Each structure stands twice: as C-alpha cells, then as structure tokens.
Image: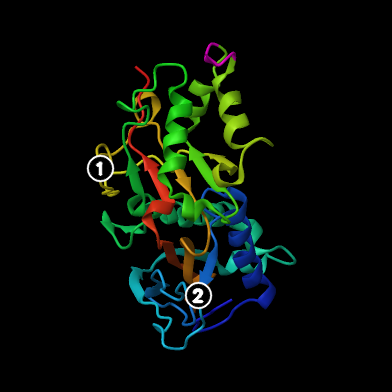
Amino acid sequence: MGKTTTTLAFSELQYLSIAKRAVKYLHEDKTFASMPLIPTKILDQEQYKHTGLLQPDVSQGVKEWSAVQKIAEGGHNSETFELAGRQMLLNMSYNETQKLGAQLIADKRDGYIAQWSQDIDYALGHGVISKGVKLNKGILEQSTIVENLNGTDSKLTTKGDGWKAIKKMVETIPLAKRQNAGGMTLRMTENFYNQISAPARIYQDRQEWDFIYDKYMGPKAIDTQKITKVIITDKIECIATDTASGEGGAAADTGGETDDRLLLTLEDIRFMARVYSRGPSLVDEQARLLNIDQLWGWKGGACVFASDAAQLSEKIVWA
C-alpha cells in the first residue's frame, strides 16, 4: 500500500482493511476488472509509455547456408497514455474513533468504499472526469466503432440480426490477434440480452441467444472465435465525453430501446491493460481539531495498445 501521509492515527490493520475492501469490490464488479494489470515503477506516475515491436524481418529463404544475408531487424513504436486519479475523502470525528473498539473503519464506511470502487471501474470505461473535463481516455473512446451490424444498418429487428452483429464484431478483430490469445470478452447491455433471448426470437429452429451461445461460447466454438466471458452491464453506454469515432459514437446514450451497445475485447496484455501508478491506498491523513480526515486515492487508466482488439458497436435499435 503506497502512502504519502502526515500522521497515522490508527493501526496498520485499519488502513489495510480499507485498501483491501476497495480492491475486493473492484474485482467483484468485474465490468472492466478482467483486463490484465500493469503497475508502473513510479508511484503516482501521470503517464505510461508503451513500446511495441513492429513486424520484424528476421529470416530469409535459402538453399545453401550463407552469412552474407540481411541481418535480422525489427522496429519499435511507442504510445503515451495519460493516467489520472479518483480520490475519496473519509472523515471521522473523534467521538467515532473512540467508539471504534475492534470495529474496522472499512465496516463503518463500507458504502463509501463500495461507491469509490464503482467510480474507479467506471473511469476505466469512460476515463477520469473532473468537473466535466476528461483527464484521460477510457476503453470506450479507444475502441474501434463497428457500424452496420446486420450488414445494412444496426437496426436488429429481424431474427438472426443479433447473431450477425456478434459475428461481424468477432470477425472485425484480425484473425492474427485472435490466434493464441485465450478468447474474447463480450460486454452487452441488459436490453440486448433480453431482446435476443426473448421466447419469440427463434432463429434456425432455436432461440437466437442459444444459437449465438453454441456458435461462440459453447463447447463447439472454435478457439479463434471463442468468447470466454460475457458481462451484462450498462457501463458501456456512451456518455457525452466519449468522443469515439464513427456514426453514433459521439452522442450520449440514454439507454433502453434505442441505445444498446456491444463491446468485444481481446484482453491480452499485448493489446490492452489496466495500468495503475497507485492502487487503492492512503494518500494523506490529517488530524484536525474535531475530526480526522483521510484522503484515499487510485491513479491509472485503461490503455488499449491495439485499437482493433477492442470493438464497440454503434448504437443498436430494435424498431
């Protein structure tokens, strides 16, 4: 637990309990917690520079061995990502501290910690926002927008259009990336699932969701098209600051029948990660006249190193 503090008023157990509770809630939510983790080497680092290897040229075809050949070489490219923080201020009066006994502060402020964890998770999707200003980008803004999900538009009224939508998104991720990557993660709004799994939505003699499951998630799914995790969430609905490219990508979603979304990601550390320069931890603590103030912080961001490994659908409508 990284700390930058003025005074410590409680036992180490109290601070650890808050930090561990925040991490627990982050992992329980799992909206974006399945992305690989990369910690920075410097506490509170404000940027992360990712260096990738370009396609190397390392071999030549020959009939006879010869050292007079082109030496193996490969270039590099780099990209810098902004990291930003979500902070939480916990306040306890001295009367409260005297009554703590064996009780943990994490129990008394459990609701605050849970909401802080939700805010961190939301920031991974949409970026950290302070007073309407975006401090860094979330995964939605770094994704490739997929349009015309059924081949014509993204009005998925016809039975089979839901399958066409997922099929297009899967195949938009290059096969070379899908090979040996361990499967994909599909996030969808709840209304999308409800529409596709409705009893009347029959496609190829079965419920359309069952058809999709068998094709991409079940035991018959081939490795290069396998969706290993499905997450139902409204956190993939775009907000006004998600200036994603493509039709429907920049306008805020309102939810419901006109603003469903799909987010398909290949969560391999070569292609994306949750980078953090501070895990949930105490930044500062101040003993004041009547109370004790604790400043807790997290700093990081979702970093997409290959935008074609993250596919965000344009708005989906049903009528």
Q: Residue at x 28, y 48 (%)?
A: 244
View extreme (bottom): residue: 67
Graded by Cα atoms within 10 Å as few (under 14), some (14 to 19) or many (20 or more), the crowding at tag 2 reads: few
Q: Quadrant of residue 211?
A: top right
Under mark 1, the amino acid is: Gly
Rendering coords of residue 68 (x, y %): 41, 88
Q: Residue at x 35, y 68 (%)?
A: 81
Determine whether 84 is above or below 32 in the image: below
Which contiguous range is marked in magenta?
200-205
In this rendering, would 239 be left or right of 63? left
- Which image quarter holds the C terminus? top left
Q: Quadrant of residue 106?
A: bottom right
Determine whether 26 is above or below 288 in the image: above
Q: Can residue 87 be seen from the camera position used here?
A: yes
Magenta span contains residue 219 = no
Q: Can residue 292 be seen from the camera position used here?
A: no
Q: Residue at x 54, y 53 (%)?
A: 179
Residue at mark 1: 246
Determine whether 305 is above or below 217 in the image: below
Under mark 2, the amino acid is: Lys
Rendering coords of residue 304 (x, y %): 41, 60
- Which image quarter holds the N terminus? bottom right
Q: Foreground residue, 136 or 116?
A: 136
Main secondary structure type of the part rendered in magenta: loop
The disc placed on residue 63 is 2
Q: Foreground residue, 282 or 228?
A: 228
Rendering coords of residue 199 (x, y %): 57, 13
Callout 1 secondary element: loop
Marks 2 and 1, how far apart in space?
Answer: 50 Å
Q: Foreground residue, 209 or 226?
A: 226
Mark 2 or mark 1, whichever is nearer to me? 2
View extreme (top): residue: 200
